[in-house]
Amino acid sequence: MSAPAGITRVSLLKDLRLEWRSKDAINSMLFFSLLVVVVFSFSFDPSAEESRQIAGGLIWVAFLFAAVVALNQTWAREIRNQVLDAYRVSPAPANSLFMAKTLGNFIFVSVLEALMTPLFIVFYRLRALGPAWQLLLAAVLGTWALVVNGTFFAAMSLRTRSREIMLPLLLFPISIPALLAMVQSTTAILNGEGARFWIVLLVTYDLVFTTVCLILFETVLNAE
Amino acid sequence: MTENTPVPVITVTNLIKQFGRFAALRGVTAEFFGGKLYAILGDNGAGKTTLLRAMAGLNQPSSGHISILGSSKFHDVCQQVGYMAHPSLLYDEMSGMENLEYFARLYGITGSTRCAEVIRAVILSVGLDPDLVRPVGQYSQGMRQRMSLARALLNDPKILLLDEPFSNVDTHSATEMVRLLARTRDQGKTLFIVTHQASLLEGAADEFVWMESGKIVGRTRELKRPESHGASAGGEVNGGNLK
Amino acid sequence: MKRVFPILGVLTAILLSYALYQALVVAPTERTMGDVQRIFYYHVPSAWTAFILFFINFGASVFYLIKRRPAADIVALVTAEVGVVFCTVVLVTGPIWARPVWGIWWTWDMRLTSTLVLWLIYVSYLFLRRFSSSGETPLLAASLAVLGALCVPFVYFSIWFFRTQHPQPVMGGGGSIDPRMLHVLLINWLAFSCFAFLVCWSRYRLEKLQRDVDHAHALESLLAPRGSVR
C-alpha cells in the first residue's frame, strides 16, 4: 500500500477507534436522528397524500441536518489538545488526512441514514415503484457530495469565529445542486420514474468537487 | 578565516507576521546554531509563540524568510524537526503507546517490531513506563508533558521546538524535564524553548533570546534582561550572535 | 489616474441617463405586459453584469492561489461585493415585475432561481471574509470562490432540468426578441458595465488604502511606546 494510502488507512482506523470508545457521541447522534424523523412526521402529516409525494425532499432535509451535526464534530477531536498541529508538522500529506476524515464522515453519516430510512419508510408508508438500485446509488452519491464538501468546509470553519454556524452557512449554498439532484432522484424513483439525469449530475458533481477539495485542502489546512 | 565557520541551523530574515491590524512579528532577524539550547523569553504578546510556530512551519509569514536546515520549505526537512506545545498534542482517549504508534506511522516508521522498539526506547528516555495502558487523558500534567515530549522525539529530530513545555507542571517534574532537555542538547540536538519561567532554564540554556513587541531586543548568555531600549530610532539592540 | 476617474464618471453618468431614456421612452411597449415590462431593461443587464463580475472573481481567485499577489485578492473581494449588489438588483426587480404580470411575487423561473443560488454562494463568500480569524483570509476566500464558481454550471444545469420537468412562468425573453428591444438591452448593459467598473475601481482604491494603513499601523515599531495602537 502506498505511503499516503497507508496514512489514510491509519488515520481512519484511529478515528473509528476513538469514535467507538467515546460512544456518547454516536449515541447522541443516533438519538438525534430519531428525533428528527419524529419531528418531521409531526410537521408533515404522513397520512396526507401530499406528504408522501414530498417524502423524497423530507428525507434529504432530515439527512442534511443530521449530517451537519455530525460534520461539526469532524475536527473537534483534532482541535482539542491541538493535535492537528502534530499532524501538520509531520511529513504526512494533508490529502491523506482529508480522505481519512471524509471517509470517516461518510461511514458515520451512512449509519445515521441507515437508521433514519426504515423509520421514514414505516412512518410514511413508502414504496419504491421505480428501480430501487438507482435509489441506493443516488443515496451513496448524494451522501458523498454532502460529506466531501462538508469535511472541507468544516476545516475552513476552523479558521473563523462562530465556527458552528459557518459550516452550514458555507455548505448549504454550494450543495444546492446536489441537494436538488438527491431530492428529485428520490422522488422520481419513489414514483416509478427513472432518475438517470440526476444520477449523472451527481456523479459529475462528486468527481469535480472531490478533485478540487483534494487540491485545495492543503492550502486551507495551513492557512493560519 | 572561513574554515570551520559554523552554518546556522535556522536563519530568520526580516520576518513579519500580520493579523489584520496587529503585527505579531515586526521584522525579526536572527541566526541560530546547532547543538545549543535557546530560551526565548518575553512578555505576553511579544511574539514568542508566533516565531516558534513560524519556525515549525505552522504559520505563513506575511513577509520575510525562514531557512531551516538549509531549506526554505519546512516540509522538506520536517523529518528532522520535533514540535511540542503547552497542550499535549495527543489524543486523550488513547493510551500513550497507541498515540505514539499513530504518530510513528505518520513519520514513516513502519514494521511492527521496529515501531515497537522505537516507541519503547523513546518512552523510557523520557522516564515513563511503556506498559502504561491508561488513556492519556487520565495522566497527570507532568506525565502528559513527558509523553508529548516522547512524541516529539519519535523521529529523532535534529531540532526541537518547544512552546511553554513547563506551564502548569509541578516544579519537580519541570526540573526533571529541563534535565532531560539538557541531555538531548548534549546529544547534539538544537532546542528552542519558549517559556515564561526563565528561571527554570538558568543553568541549562546556552543563550537567552529576549523578545518584545514582535522583535528580538537582545540576546544574552546570562539570565539578565537587556535594558529596555524604548524609543531608539531604527535598528534593533542585538547582543550579537553568540557562538 | 486622478483625472481619468472623474472623466469616466461623467461619461458613465451620461451613458446611464441615455440608457434610462432609451428604456423608458424609446423602447417599444411590450404587447402583453405593457409598460411594466420595461423593468426587463434593468433586470437582465444586472444579471449579465453580476455574472461577468463573478467570472472575474473566479479568475482573480485562481490567480491568487497560484501567484499570491495581494492585488488579485483585492480584485476578488471587490468583484464579489459589487456582484452581490447587482445580484440583489436582479432578485428585487424580479418580484417587482412578476407581481403585476402574473399575480405572484416569485416564480421559480430559471434565471431568477439561478441568480438566487448565485447570490447565496457569494454572500457566503462575503461572510467568510468577515468571519475569518486567520492571518491568511485571502487564501481561504480564494478557495471558497473556486468551489463556488465551479458550482455555477451545476446550478444552471440542475435548475434547467428541474424546470423542464416542472414548467413555470418564464420571465421575459423566452423566445425571439424584437431587435429594437435588444438594442436598448445592450445599451443598458453597456451603461451598467461602465458603472460596475467605476464602482469596482473606486472600491479597489479604497481597499488598497485601507490595507496600506493597516500595514503601517501594524509595523509601527520602536518609535511608538510598547505594544501596537489598536
Image (cartoon, helix red, strand yellow):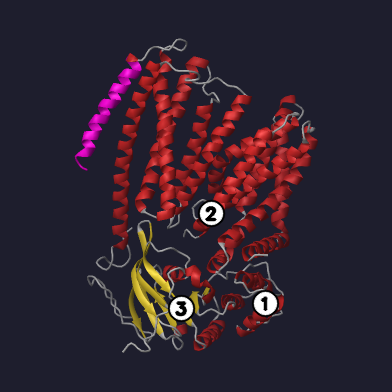
Labelled disc at residue B192: 3
Q: Nearer the viewer, mark 2 or mark 1?
A: 2
Labelled disc at residue A215: 2
Q: Quadrant of the C terminus of chain B?
A: bottom left
Q: Residues within 10 Å of mark 2 (few under 14, many from 20)?
A: some
Q: Chain of mark 3?
A: B
Q: Secondary structure at mark 1?
A: helix
Q: Are marks 3 and 1 on the same chain?
A: yes
Q: Residues within 10 Å of mark 3 (few under 14, many from 20)?
A: many
Residue B206 horizontal/vertical position (percent): 42, 86
Q: Secondary structure at mark 3?
A: strand
User: Chief secondary structure of the magenta span?
Assistant: helix
Residue C76 horizontal/vertical position (percent): 40, 45
Residue C131, visible in the rendered structure:
no
Q: Residue at x 76, y 29 (%)?
A: A192
Residue contact between numbered discs 2 and 1, judged by CB atoms under 8 Å: no
Q: Are marks 3 and 2 on the same chain?
A: no
Q: Chain of mark 1?
A: B
Q: In the displayed structure, does residue C23 sit left or right of residue A164? A: left
Q: Chain of mark 2?
A: A
Labelled disc at residue B115: 1
Residue B77 horizontal/vertical position (percent): 50, 73
Q: Nearer the viewer, residue C154 or A70?
A: C154
Q: In the displayed structure, does residue A59 sit left or right of residue B229? A: right
A173 is higher (above) or lower (below) than C211: above
